[in-house]
Amino acid sequence: MGTHEEQDVARQRFDVADAVPLLLDAQGVVTSWTRDAQRLLNYAAAEVVGTRVTGLLTTEDAARLPELAERCRRDGGWAGLLTARRKDGRPVRVMVRVTPAVEPGGVAHWLVLVSDMADAGGWDMSRPVLEQMVTGSPVGIAIVDANLRFVWSNDALAKFGGGSPQDRLGLRISDVQPGIDTAAIEEQMRHVLATGRPVVGYEHVGRIKSAPHRETAHMMSFTRLDDEQGHPMGVYYTVVDVTERHRARQRLALLDRAGEHIGRTLDIVRTAQELADVAVPDFADFVSVDLLESVLRGAEPTPGPLSDTEPVSLRRSGHQSVNEGVPEAVVEIGEVATYLAGSPPIRSLTTGRPWREERLDPLAKEWATRIPGGRAATFLELGLHSVIIVPIRARGVALGVTTFFRRARQEPFDEDDLSLAEDLVSRAAVCVDNARRYTRERDAALVLQRSLLPRRLPEQNAVEVAACYRPADELTGLGGDWYDLIPLSGARVALVVGEVPGHGIDAAAAMGRLRTAVRTLAALDLPPEEVLAHLDDLVVRTAREEGVAPDGRETGDVQVAGSGCVYVVYDPVDGQCSMAAAGHPAPAVVMPDGTVSFVDLPQGPPLGAAGPPFEAVELALAEGSTLALHTDGLLARGEDWAVDADRDRLRGALERAASSLDLRCRAVVDALVPARPYDDVALLMARTRLLGEDQVADWDLPADPAVVADARKEATRQLTEWGLEELAFTTELVVSELVTNAIRHADGPIRLRLIRERALICEVSDGGATAPHLRHPRTTDEGGRGLLLVSQFTERWGTRFVPEGKVIWAEQPLTESPA
């Protein structure tokens, strides 16, 4: 019996209860014989004890005893099958287990346990029966010798290629099946021959001669065969076809990869390209993804079936090939091709059903017309021979088509491939539709953003401005922070930065309402603290209407209570600046020499939070100073930072020089804000300017009607000096009416001021607290036409209140801005 057979026997359960014990000395002489041994072999104890055990075995097994004794000494025991001889000469097959036993005196003995195998019918199985089992097995079986040449194989092996058993004899597998990776298979055989360790479950993938166009997979197992002396004789191996399992595993792997790689972004074109990338090269050799124009725009596709009687234009959104440069593509990504009515892509698009063709007509042309560059070609020229077209559909609506071609591999697409293609496209269709819907929502959000944030800050001469906005919601690009620059009367400007709680579209909508309210209040020319007071009242009313309590507890969808705002008014005539804040960081000031300080601005309560009145501060700014207004997101890092630490970081960023204010503004945000900010960020930087002395003229006037004529003369003289004689007539009229109105209806000193900026500004101030009203006098009225004339001859006019009274002003446009 060979070594492997003995090992197999040794692994079997040895029933000690049924075993017959014998005791042998070191020379193999029987020293103990039991009644069970007598019943098994029919020898009496007197006939056996003192004789060598070889007399109890057949001649063949008796000759093996020296070898078995050596193995017992080397391995500490032995187990296997032997054939014993009964007293009447009849052989009996027994299972034997030998273990060493040492008596107390130190004498070595061997304990032998013998079990009768007469009832094990399998051991008496005839050779014809065994040959019938291996010959009729559906599993391919073969035996090769030590030189890897076939010595036997069953008929089932022929279906795996290589010919009949007779054709294989004396040949190697590389001789009969040259198309497969025979080197790898023979390497497994050599490994088994060298080590004696079997190889189980080796999978070989390739193409066999009987199915050259179809990739097949086989599971192979190899076992070494030894002779009775334990020398290797050859290899016994089996082959099982596992192609279907292999292909199912490939499909699952491809679908898993599709789930991992398709739809990683919400970009439609990138999603289409990801679909093409996943399918090549494991499934197809060339893939194209074409989408409807409306899908790429993010628009809702037209419901209902498309017409298949008219050409349809599709835009190439993605393609991939096993060949570098995608030579099969006659349409480049981003180009539009019009597919012919009734062509397979249009039929799939309109019917919603896929289409498969195992063998394309090699002389047929691509199905598109009006191809950019006129690059039409036949399928033969493109090398394409098999195709699957799957419509891209989501929620019952057609979005486009995906076309899978095979070129390099000769195996045509089959029904299983069609099912896999449908699974791939259905997964991608959901991602494409999500990207389309996101594109639509994002475009709508961007339209909202453009309507809420200033697309371009107004041109004016009071300050040089730069702004940077970075939302926390990177998907929509919207947030609750805002900034603004609002031109005021008298060449002044208002600078505003604010924020509302939250992010996204809701916060942006709430922000837009507050920004509109600030602009409306700014038009009234109110001081900063009064602007914030009115804004606070508006927020309280809005919160009540929308279900938000004054303490900021949100009970509705949009929360405006708790918003912050800083409002700054700068006058370029004298460099005076006034500001107030509602729950908002104080601005920083960068002096002309580069030093940075922070305005000591009283922090009023957030808007709608109910608290003490807002307070304003005034300061004079040197020309060339830079105001930096920002939201608290500029310093937010998801941690609790001390105020001093925040300001030190901001100071360091503001002190860095830059070639322009725009670059400086962007550099500050880049230095302080991570790529994905924790909060919305808005930064508005304004570098101050001063109007020159030659741009402003003013006169103090007594409250005497006779002074009106002098005021007209002084104004005309000043316009002549400025080279604005063409405005003299209108200006005389405006000065005359405004000064006359002040003398008649106001108290206190009267002052006339002309400002030459982007417009000619005429201002008359007095000590009165009553705003004039525009009247429409009747024909018989003797007065009331002054402001009516002013409104008709000037571009705009208005009134603002100051601590000393009021200022009535009017503006006339200049044909060109002053240098």
Image (cartoon, rainbow, N blue to C red):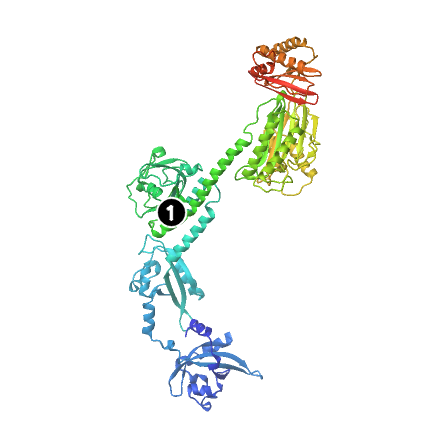
Asked whether residue 156 is in view, the answer is yes
Q: Dot 1 lies on which element?
A: loop
Q: Residue 158, located in which quarter of the rendered image?
A: bottom left
Q: Farthest bottom residue?
A: 46
Whole-percent x and y of residue 426?
41, 47
Q: Residue 693, located in which quarter of the rendered image?
A: top right
What's the residue at 41%, 66% (across, down)?
223
Whole-percent x and y of residue 721?
62, 10
Whole-percent x and y of residue 297?
44, 36
Q: Tell me the quarter of the image containing the C terminus.
A: top right
Asked if residue 308 is positioned above or below residue 165 in the image, the reply reads: above
- Who is closer to the viewer here, 224 or 323? 323
- Who is closer to the viewer here, 519 or 54? 519
Whole-percent x and y of residue 657?
63, 30
- Who is closer to the viewer here, 40 or 419? 419
What's the residue at 35%, 39% (across, down)?
306
Residue type at tag 1: Ala
- Who is closer to the viewer here, 498 or 541? 541
Q: Farthest front residue?
A: 780
Which residue is tagged 1?
A: 284
Q: Residue 304, located in which quarter of the rendered image?
A: top left
Is residue 619 left or right of 354 when viewed as pictured? right
Asked if residue 17 is positioned above or below residue 769 in the image, the reply reads: below
Q: Tell me the quarter of the image containing the N terminus.
A: bottom left
